[in-house]
Amino acid sequence: MAAMNERAVLEVMCPRCGPVRAEASAARCGLDAGGVALCEVTCPACAAQIFARTTTRVAEAIVSYGATKDPHAPLELLEPHEGPPLTWDDLLDLHNDLSKEDEA
Ligand SMILES: [Zn+2]
């Protein structure tokens, strides 16, 4: 029951393309009990799988923007040195009404 006219964009680091922006609603987030989370998005440019480490708080926010909660996320990928963690600064709240694409 999320407000469908609210959109948020995540800035993530694609291993091939560098920093790219993907819609939060397209992400899948796995939350760990320890306060860490793993968000998986598909690179909009090259379709690579991108894993971003973040906190459960940020992940919950991303989920509130329409991301899928994935109880089977490969949380073992939360091992360090997979690129910089996703922070609030990377969650760009754009409220972009210009491109209202119907994806239903
Ligand atoms: Zn890419």
Image: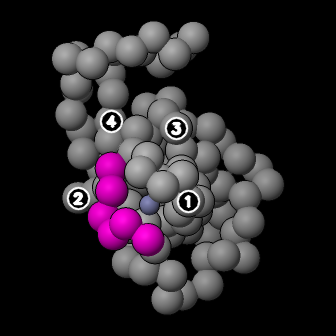
Q: Residue at x 65, y 42 (%)?
A: 69
Q: Position of residue 94 (x, y in %)?
A: 21, 34
Q: How far apart are marks 2 and 4 (CA)?
A: 12 Å
Amino acid type at mark 3: Ala
Q: Can the viewer see residue 37 in this picture? A: no
Amino acid type at mark 2: Asp
Q: Where is residue 37 in the image (x, y as percent from the top left)?
A: 57, 62
- Which mark is first along the chain, 3 or 4? 4
Find residue 48 and name its label. 1
Helix, strand or loop at disc 3? Answer: helix
Quadrant position of the C terminus in the picture? top right
Verify whether residue 39 appears in magenta. no
Q: Name the residue under label 4.
A: 8
The answer to whether mark 2 is within 8 Å of ligand 1 is no
Q: Indicate which quadrant contains ligand 1.
A: bottom left
Of marks 1 and 2, the one in the foreground:
1
